[in-house]
Image (cartoon, coloured by chain):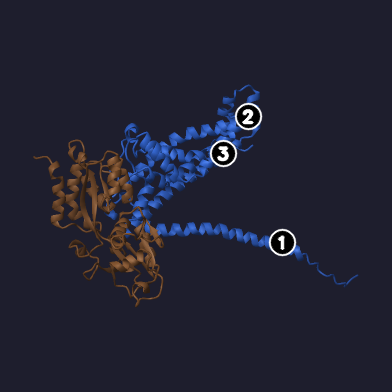
Chain colours: A brown, B blue
Amino acid sequence: MFPISEAAAEEYSKITRTRINVGFSGTGAGFEKFCRGDINISDASRPIKDSEIEACARKGIDDIVELQVAIDALTIVVNPSNDFLDCLTVQQLHDLFSGKAEKWSEINPNWPDRDAKLFYPGTDSGTFDYFVEEIIEKVDENAFHTGDGTPSEDDNVLALGIRNEDNAIGYLGFAYFLEAGKSLKAVAIDGGEGCVEPKFETALDGTYSPLSRPLFIYTRESLLADHPNDPTLSFIEFYLTSTETLVPEVGYVTMPDDLLQAQLDKIEPFLSPE
Amino acid sequence: MQGEHIEPVDLRATGAVARRQAFSRLSRYLLLAMSLLGVATLVVLGYITIDDGAGRIDLDFLTNYPSRFADQAGLRSSALGTIWILGTTIVLAIPVAVGTAIWIEEFAPKNALLTFVKLNIANLAGVPSIIYGILGLAMFVRFADLGPSILAGALTLTLMIIPMTVIASQEAIKQVPPSLREGSLAVGATQWQTVWSHVLPSALPGIITGVILSISRAAGETAALIMIGAFSFIAFDHSLNPAEALQDDFTTIPIQIYNWTIRPQEAFRQNAAAAIILLMIAVFTLNLTAAVIRERFRRTY
């Protein structure tokens, strides 16, 4: 998420000479700051949780605006030496990451009788939350994400770990898979309608489901309404209209036009009539 | 007697003595190996870093703001932020730390309170920096409502380095021989005059060394500053007027390095390596200065 907002801030401050500062944290920590009023815009690689909306409301922040800015294909990757794994069903993925299956052979009897080594992002990241919701809780609401593996807040560490471990499987942002090239192998996902590989096209048309995920920015109506004194509205308008060029530059997927228009419609009422 | 053959005497030790001597020789090589291990790690790390990053260092790298394009990104805002943070930290920390050390060594009555204070300082010196970050976030950023500003960052680092600066200064003051104080007091100087004119000048090289080493630690600090909410992307120069600059948001070189290392693109990691080289040069220069000052102003008694 950070690279997209950095790109928008970089271009916007070049054009307008306005100070737009971008900080870095997990999605959860970002919302915490946002709800304290420390920051005007909070990036999120998952939708805001009900518990976070309540926490915000308790601090008097009850005018939250959600704007989607991009799409990311959450990518399941394995070691390139792995020759048996090309496609996983959501159920198989669920079994591995909820701890129900420990060996490859437990999710498919034709696969080796070896332990799968799991790599996943840290619990503060939106990537982790999104995976838990889509793969763990939607399949079985009483299941939990396993703690038996290697977590890291740094996707590069995950990529490195998976590259060095023959029986590794993990998930990370599409940009990291793109950059890793042949040192990682992406696994197609079967969400019920056949195996779909993670690609710009499949993320954009929505067939890479359920792991193509929306990326958001959150702000407040009161900040948007206060536009003569506050650059938030002007920055967000610039951000949305620039996503088409900026988002692919940093390795994420742009939204389809109608989705972008829907976001622009949300800030339309705040823009001055002239 | 002529022609009589004299057996040469074998002076080599035998038995238990020989074993002790062998062990002694062995220990020398063992200890050498241990120190080489540390140096070798440093050399390997240094080589990898220089190999990765040296090609990225040029004037643009120093004068550009951060960017989403690795080849256009630079250290301008993070280097300025580092200078402001360290400068402010020095101004805030030195009087408090050196003052505390002088009080403990020269003025404080040797009682339970002093023991308590000294114990606390020793303990605080071992507290992980992230804890100071949490303290700084609660005290300066939120309670004092300074926001994640240069002043809040510098105050946090000030708290962090005071304990070790106090301890280093105490050690330096302890090195000043009592005869110097006694001589000064004997000719009628007050206690303060003695401290100011005799103890401090003698202890100064040691104090400066301690201060510079603490500053080196502050220069590389990341966790505490990220904790207080320091930004990663800053694209403006701080005002030269401290009253304005101290309220500015900021970023520092270690934060920039951290941010670059977690990017997917390899080119950003080269940027990080280049920034590490520059930061290492800066810290090395600081440490060298400390060594030079120590040697130049050393007084022997």
Mark 1 belongs to which amino acid?
Arg
Instruction: Report in which chain the residue with disc 1 lies.
Output: B
Mark 2 belongs to which amino acid?
Arg
Query: Where is B135 relative to B37, above or below?
Result: above
- Image disc number at residue A50: none
- Sequence order check, earlier mark of 1 and 2: 1
Instruction: Give the percent coordinates (x, y) of residue A63.
Output: 22, 42
Element carrying mark 3: helix
Instruction: Report in which chain the residue with disc 2 lies.
Output: B
Q: Nearer the viewer, residue B3 or A169?
A: A169
Residue ID for mark 1 = B20
Q: Is residue B206 visible?
A: no
Query: Where is B173 relative to A73, above or below?
Result: above
Mark 3 belongs to which amino acid?
Leu
Residue ID for mark 3 = B119
- Sequence order check, earlier mark of 3 and 1: 1
**Residue at coordinates 33% horizontally, 57% vertically from top-left?**
A128
Residue ID for mark 2 = B181
Instruction: Report how far apart the C-alphas of labels 1 and 2 lie in the structure.
Output: 47 Å
Instruction: Give the percent coordinates (x, y) of residue A37.
Output: 29, 40
**Which mark lies nearer to you, 1 or 2?**
1
Tell whether A14 sits left or right of B38.
Answer: left
Instruction: Give the percent coordinates (x, y) of residue A53.
Output: 27, 46
Instruction: Report how far apart the C-alphas of labels 3 and 2 lie in the structure.
Output: 26 Å
